[in-house]
Amino acid sequence: MSKDIDWSNLGFGYIQTDKRFVANFKNGAWDGGALVEDANITMSECACVLQYAQTCFEGLKAYTTEDGKVVCFRPDLNAKRMADTCKRLQMPVFPEDKFVEAVEQVVKANIEFVPPYGSGATLYIRPFMFGINPVIGVKPADEYQFRIFCTPVGPYFKGGAKPITIRVCDYDRAAPHGTGHIKAGLNYAMSLYPIVDAHEQGFDENMYLDAATRTYVEETGGANFIFITKDGKLVTPKSDSILPSITRRSLMVVAEKYLGMTVEHRPVAFEEVKDFAECGLCGTAAVISPVGKINDHGKEICFPSGMDEMGPVLKKLYDTLTGIQMGRIEAPEGWIDTIG
C-alpha cells in the first residue's frame, strides 16, 4: 500500500518518513545500528560537525519498476564513494556491505513512501555521517554518527527537462589537491554563494573551470558535465578535483555497451566547448539536464542540438538509463538491487 500522497504534484523537497537508520561510532568501533522513529538529532553545541564541518553525505534513489518491484540503483558505488570520502576527511569508514544493508532496511521500513511506477516521482535516500563529540582544538572527532533518511520527491524538472542556461563562474569550486573528488558537505557550502549569485544574474547554474589554469572544464556545484561531439561521441571531463558521479559513470557504460558510441573520458579544454553538438549535466536528482547555452562573460555558446529541448543523443542516453532503472531495459549485472 502507498501513502495517501499526491505523487504527481510532489516537489523536490523534504517530507518526513516513518523510519531512519542510525549507527554510532564510539571507542573505536561502530555499533550495530538500528531503525528509529525520531527524526531529530541531539548533540553538544561544541560538536565537531558544528565547529569544523566534519561531515559527508551521499544521495541515491529507490524506484518502483514497471513490474512493480522496488529497487535501488547501484548502492554499492555510493558505499564505496562514501568510504573514499571518509578516508579523506579522517572519519571512520562505515563498512560498505553494512551501508547497502542499511539502505535496504530504510527503504523496506518506508516502503509505503516509494512512489508508484509512472508517477515521475522517486524515493530519495540520503546517507550521511558527521563528527558528534565536542571538539574545540582543530582535530578530527572521536565519535561519529551515521544516518540514513529518505523522502519521496517529484521529478527534478516539472513539465520535462527544458534546456538551461549556465555561466562560466569566476569563483573556484575546488583546489587541485583539495576535496573536489569527495562528497564533503563543505564543498557544497562553498558553492552556495556562486549559485545564488548566478540565479540573481538570470542563470540556472555555474560552470566551474579548473582552479589552477582556468582553462579546463570541471563541473557545476552538484553535477558532472557530459558533451556530445558533432560525430556522435560522448566526452566527459576528467580531473582529480571532479566528483566521480555514479550517473556519469553509468552513462559512459550505457553509451558504449547499449548504444555503440565511442566514449572519451579526458581533460576537456574550455576552448573546445563551442565545437560540441550537445551539452548536459548529469546527476542522481535529474539524471540528465540539457544545457542550451553557456554564457562566458557576455559571449554566448549555443548548442545546435539542444536549444529548445534535450538533444537527440542525450535523449537516447537518458531514455536508456532511465529504462534500465525502471526495469524496462535489462540492466548490466549488479546494477539493480531489488528490495521489495
Image (cartoon, rainbow, N blue to C red):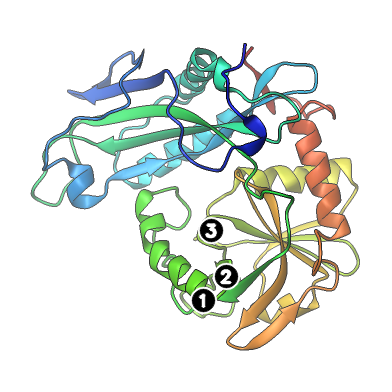
Say if 314 sits above or below 279 in the image. above
Name the disc covering residue 242, or none.
Answer: 3
Amino acid on which the number 3 mark rests in the picture: Ile
Viewer can see residue 129: yes
User: Horizontal and vertical percent for residue 17?
Assistant: 45, 23
Image marks 2 and 3: residues in contact by CB distance under 8 Å: no
Q: Nearer the viewer, mark 2 or mark 3?
A: 2
- Judging by the rendered image, the residue that carries numbered circle 2 is 207
Q: Would you say residue 262 is visible in this rendering?
A: no
**Tag 2: amino acid:** Met
Please identify the quarter of the rendering in which residue 122 is found.
top right
- Please identify, in this view, whether the residue under mark 1 or under mark 3 is nearer the observer: 1
Q: Residues within 10 Å of mark 1 (few under 14, many from 20)?
A: many
* Structural distance between the alpha carbons of marks 2 and 1: 6 Å
SS at badge 1: loop
Place residue 164 in its image quadrant: bottom right
SS at badge 3: loop
Quarter the C terminus occupies? top right
Residue 276 in the image: state x and y as whole percent. Answer: 79, 72
Q: What residue did someone put label 1 on?
A: 169
Mark 3 crowdedness (10 Å alpha carbons): few <14, some 14-19, many ≥20 = many
Q: Amino acid at mark 1?
A: Cys
- How many numbered markers are drawn? 3
Disc 2 on helix, strand or loop?
Answer: strand
Q: CA distance from mark 1 to mark 3?
A: 16 Å
Q: Earlier in the sequence, mark 2 or mark 3?
A: 2
Question: Residue sitting at 57 percent across and 16 percent down?
Answer: 112
